[in-house]
Image (cartoon, rainbow, N blue to C red):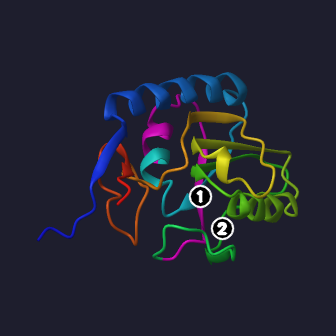
Amino acid sequence: MDSRPKLNILFSRDEIEAAVRRLATEIGRDYHDRFPLLIGILRGSFVFMADLIRQLDFPLEVDFIGAASYGCSTRSSGQVKLSHRLQSEVRGREVLLVEDIVDTGLTTACLLDYLRRKKPASLKLCALTDKPSRRKVPITIDYLGFTVPDRFLVGYGLDLGQKFRNLPDICALEEA
């Protein structure tokens, strides 16, 4: 008996590539001459961020911050834990936080508050996916790839218990 979950492709690799190009164009208009600091939220954003920065044709700095509220579950625990701290100076910088998915908003809000306390010159959010139906706190997304339904997603960096990040498409777990 096969114990692997059934997956339905929600966004193909071609659709994702087009969204990343569109986001890079939008970000490029706003940050072209500003030497921004792009901060990826580990671990989910690393695939998206790698593709995104390769589309940006201006000087930038990259750093990562680790935070999670899921563990191995398909539902947020509501508790946000920092697991990797920034190495870069934020004060006075143009900062763009890069997120794979905004779900409840708890992790994103926590990280935005953390970064605001570090006094950046500006702080914006870029998210590949947004699941507004699950939102518990308000979040403003400045650059958005896709709005998604209330389904658990994997692939293109998104995971279930650290599995499926390597899938080239964004897939929804099929409900049992």
Residue at left offset 69%, top offset 42%: 36
> Which image quarter is the N terminus in?
bottom left
Q: Residue at x 55, y 29 (%)?
A: 24
Tell me, yes or no, whether the two marked residues, 2 and 1, touch with CB atoms within 8 Å. Answer: yes
Distance from label 2 to label 1 (Cα)?
6 Å
**Extreme left residue here?**
1
Circle 2: residue type: Leu
Q: Residue at coordinates 83% horizontally, 57% vertically from top-left? A: 91
Is residue 89 visible to us here? Answer: no
Helix, strand, or loop for circle 2? loop
Q: Position of residue 43 (x, y in %)?
A: 49, 64
Residue picked out by circle 1: 63
Horizontal side of 3 relative to 98 (left or right) equals left
Q: Which residues are magenta?
A: 50-71
Q: Could you tell which of marks 2 and 1 lies nearer the N-terminus?
A: 1
Nearest the camera: 64 or 103?
103
